[in-house]
């Protein structure tokens, strides 16, 4: 039986193995979206990595379902930004991005929002 307590999911205190990684950061950005081109995940990540480096006390937490191909896309973009910004892959340390790819129970969403200082959302267009 699935009780919604998957590994990597927020617990009652708003902390887990992944979310706890953001502890110690001075400023936490949060974004929640479906991982698809229209949601402009690439624009968001590029802007974040171009602006911030590791050690600046910032972190971007993304809540999105991701598969293996999505992770490969993200890592490819990270490599592009590193080359452009630093001259080579591994030439500098881009700011931390934490991916929460497990479901977060509805009742625990307020805890996730409280962990963040700013909500960010990039989009190539919304309907409805």
Image (cartoon, rainbow, N blue to C red):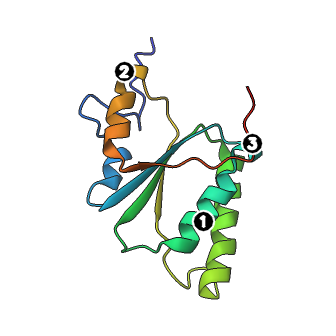
Q: Establish if 103 lies above or below 96.
A: above
Residue that lies at the very extreme toward the front in this rendered image: 128
Mark pair 2, 1: CA separation: 31 Å
Task: Determine which quarter of the picture holds residue 106.
Answer: top left
Q: At 56% from the left edge and 85% from the top edge, which residue is drawn?
A: 91
Crowding near pointer 1: few (<14 within 10 Å), some, many (20+)?
few
Q: Circle 2 sits on which residue?
A: 107
Q: At 37% from the left edge and 38% from the top edge, which residue is drawn?
A: 113
Foreground residue, 25 or 7? 25
Foreground residue, 39 or 63? 39
Residue that lies at the very extreme toward the top in this rendered image: 1
Q: At 68% from the left edge and 57% from the top edge, which residue is drawn?
A: 42
Residue 85, percent from left and from top: 61, 82
Q: Circle 3 sits on which residue?
A: 125
Foreground residue, 51 or 35? 51
Q: At 46% from the left edge and 68% from the top edge, which residue is drawn?
A: 95
Of callouts 2 and 1, the N-terminal one: 1
Discs 3/2, front: 3
């Amino acid at each position: 039986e699935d009780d919604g307590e998957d590994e990597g999911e927020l617990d009652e205190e708003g902390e887990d193995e992944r979310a706890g990684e953001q502890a110690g950061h001075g400023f936490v950005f949060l974004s929640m979206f479906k991982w698809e081109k229209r949601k402009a995940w690439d624009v968001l990540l590029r802007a974040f990595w171009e602006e911030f480096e590791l050690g600046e006390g910032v972190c971007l937490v993304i809540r999105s379902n991701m598969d293996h191909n999505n992770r490969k896309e993200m890592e490819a973009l990270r490599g592009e930004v590193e080359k452009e910004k630093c001259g080579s892959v591994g030439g500098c340390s881009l700011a931390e991005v934490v991916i929460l790819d497990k479901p977060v129970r509805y009742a625990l969403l307020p805890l996730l929002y409280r962990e963040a200082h700013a909500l960010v959302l990039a989009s190539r267009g919304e309907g409805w």
